[in-house]
Amino acid sequence: MTLWQEIEDLQKKKAELEFQLRSIEEKEKTLEERARLLEEKLAIQQLEEKLKIKTETVEKLESRINELERKLKPSPTVVAAPEPERQTTPQQNENSYSLRKLFGEN
């Protein structure tokens, strides 16, 4: 083999190796981008799960607070208020008398 042929073979080999290197570098770049994409998706998924858990916790706390506040409020039961002293008017006296007379009471 002549020196020129050997140089030509080496140049071909060099060009082939450079092509393979560029190809593998492109693949590496694509894989890095894909890995970053998947990492972002995973981070989002984890945040969504944390958000869901926190939302459920907040809803449970709100519900608990509402229940406690409801229990603290006085129930709207009828409170027996002292009856005011009755003042009889002449008409009430007449009605009482009429009713007693009607039912035979004195």
Image: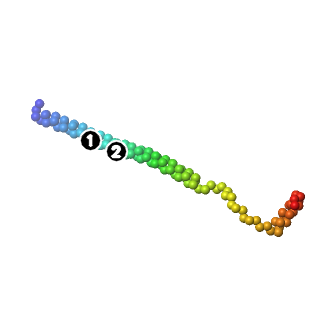
Indicate how the structure is coloured in the image: rainbow
Kindly identify the residue that appears in the image at 37 percent across and 42 percent down: 38
Q: Secondary structure at mark 2?
A: helix
Kindly identify the residue that appears in the image at 64 percent across and 56 percent down: 76
Specify whether 57 is left or right of 20.
right
Q: Is the C-beta separation of discs 2 and 1 under 8 Å? A: no
Q: Which residue is mark 2?
A: 36
Q: Position of residue 34 (x, y in %)?
A: 34, 42
Kindly identify the residue that appears in the image at 10 percent across and 32 percent down: 2
**Does residue 41 appear in this view?**
no
Question: Which circle's residue, 2 or 1, is located before the other in the chain?
Answer: 1
Query: Closer to the camera, 91 or 59?
Result: 91
Label 1 sits on what residue type? Glu
Q: Residues within 10 Å of mark 2 (few under 14, many from 20)?
A: few
Q: Quadrant of the C terminus?
A: bottom right
* Above-or-below relation of 63 to 98: above
Q: Which residue is mark 1?
A: 25
Specify whether 79 is left or right of 38.
right
Query: Closer to the camera, 65 or 90?
Result: 90
Q: Position of residue 89 (x, y in %)?
A: 80, 68
Specify whether 20 is left or right of 1.
right
Label 2 sits on what residue type? Arg
What is the tally of numbered marks visible in this picture? Answer: 2
Q: Quadrant of the N terminus?
A: top left
**Does residue 87 appear in this view?**
yes
Q: Secondary structure at mark 1?
A: helix
Q: Position of residue 54 (x, y in %)?
A: 46, 48
Query: Closer to the camera, 55 or 66?
Result: 66
Which quadrant of the structure image shows residue 77?
A: bottom right
Query: Closer to the camera, 78 or 51?
Result: 78
